[in-house]
Amino acid sequence: MGNYPTPEGYDVAPVYGENIFAPDALKHPFSHYKKIRDLGPVVRLPTDPEIFALSRFHDIKEALNHRDILTSSKGVGFNDYVNREFPEPPTIQRDDESHKRLRRAVQHNLTPVALKRYRTMLKEIIDTRISEAANGETIDAVTSVSQLLPLKAIKHLVGLPENGRERMLEWATATFNSGGPIEAYEDREAFVRDAEILIEAMMYVRQVKREDLVAGSWTSDLFDAVAAGKLTMGEAHAAMSGLVIPSLDTTIFAMSSLLYALGQNPDQYEMLKRDPGLISGAVYEAVRHSGPARWFSRYALSDYVAGDVFIPAGARVMLMYAAANRDERRYDDPDRFDITRKAGDQLGWGGGPHLCGGMNLARLEMELLLESLIAHVDRIEVEEPELSESRGLYGLTQLPLRLFRRS
C-alpha cells in the first residue's frame, strides 16, 4: 500500500498492518484500538479499498458534525453489498431533509417522557427474572437476563406480527455482521447468508401492511403519519426498518457487558448498592467501557482533514466509536471500569444527527436491570465469557453468571 496524493502541508495517514477484522482481533479488540490511536489521528487499514480510520475521541466528535463532507448517504458499512443504493434508503443512510422527517416520526415514542408509560411493565418483567435467578445457581447471563427485555417486551412494542417478531434478533445479528470488508470474511458463504438475511429483512418491512401490525404500536404510528401526509409510504417503510432491524443486539451486548463488569469489579457493585444514585452513571460507564458498537463508516464527499492528516474525497472513513471511548486523551485510566466517572459524552451510541434513536430505551432497560439487582442481589459472580466475532458489534455471546440473594 503506497502513499496517496496529499497537498503540501498535510500529513499522510500511516498504515496499521494488522487485520482488525480477524476473529481473534474481533474477540480481543482493545489492544488494537490503542495501537491505532497511538499511530495518529487518521490511520489507513490495508483493505481493498483502503479504509481511513479515526479512533480518537475529539476527531470523531468533530467528524460527526460534518455530515456535509462525511456522509451516511452512501452507506455505513464497508462493502458495496450492504452499501447499495435502496429505492427508499433506511434512516441511517440518509443525510437530507427526509432524515429529519423519519427521525421525528419515530422519536416521539422514544423520548424519556414517552417511555415512562412502559416502565412499570418492564420493571415487573426484569424484577421477576432477577428474583428467580438470585439463588446462587449458574445461568447464562446473555440468554437468561440480557435478552429478556428486548425479546419479551420490545418486540411487542415495535408491533410486528408474530412471523416478524420471531426474526428480529436474527435480522439484527446479520445486519451488523455483514458490514465488514468482503475480504475480512474467512467464510464467504457465511457472509452471503448474513447479507441475504439483511435483504430479507428489508423486503419484509416493505411488504408489511397496516392491518398486520399491533394497533397503537410504534410501527402502526408510522402508517398514521402516512395518513396524515407527514411521510410517504416509502419513507414509512424506511423508518420502520430502523425500528425493526437494529433494535436488539446493541442493548443485549451492553447489558451482558454491564453484568460482567460488575462481577469482575465487586467494589463497584458494593458502591452501587450503597448509592443507587449512581445507576445512571453506571449505565453510561458500561457502554463506554465495553463499546458494543465497534464502528460505522462514512463516505468523504470532498477532501477532509483530521488533525494534520489529509483524507481524500471518495475515501471510505471508519469512525471507531469503541476506540474513542478508551481514548486516554479524553478519559483518565480509560481501561478501568468506574461507575463514578463522568461518561455521559461517551460515543457508544454514536453522536450528531445520527445519534442512536433507541438510546433512551436502552438506558431505561439497563437502569431497570440495575434497580432489580440492587433490590434482590447481594453478590455477583461471573466466569470467563464467550466473545462475539461480529464485524460490527463487540460483546459477550455467553456469560456464566451467579446471583446471590440479599438477606
Image (spheres, rainbow, N blue to C red):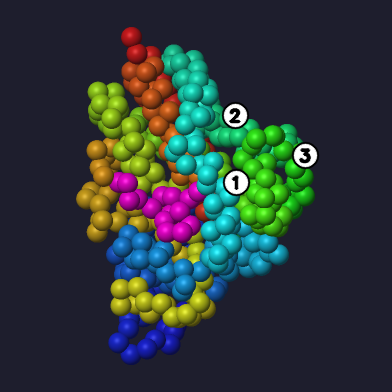
Residue at horizontal 40%, vertical 73%?
Answer: 15
Decide whether the magenta segment is chiefly helix, strand or loop: loop
Q: Earlier in the sequence, mark 1 or mark 2?
A: 2
Mark 2 residue element: helix
Name the residue beneath numbered marker 3: 211
- The kind of residue on which mark 2 rests is Lys
Mark 1: few/some/many CA within 10 Å (<14, 14-19, 20+): many
Mark 2: few/some/many CA within 10 Å (<14, 14-19, 20+): few
Residue at horizontal 31%, vertical 38%?
Answer: 281
Mark 3: few/some/many CA within 10 Å (<14, 14-19, 20+): few
Cα separation between marks 3 and 2: 22 Å
Q: Nearer the viewer, mark 3 or mark 2?
A: 3
Q: Does the magenta stretch include residue 79?
A: no
Task: List the single residue furthest toward the top.
Answer: 407
Give the x, y percent position of residue 216: 65, 35
Give the x, y percent position of residue 213: 72, 38
Examine the rendered structure and indicate whether residue 262 appears above or below residue 101.
above
Q: Nearer the viewer, mark 3 or mark 1?
A: 3
Q: Do the residues labelled 3 and 1 touch (CB within 8 Å)?
A: no
Task: List the single residue furthest toward the left.
Answer: 332
Q: Residue 243 carries which label?
A: 1
Name the residue beneath numbered marker 2: 152
Mark 1 residue element: helix
Q: Do the residues labelled 3 and 2 touch (CB within 8 Å)?
A: no
Residue at horizontal 56%, vertical 44%?
Answer: 247
Magenta span covers which residues? 343-357
- The kind of residue on which mark 1 rests is Leu
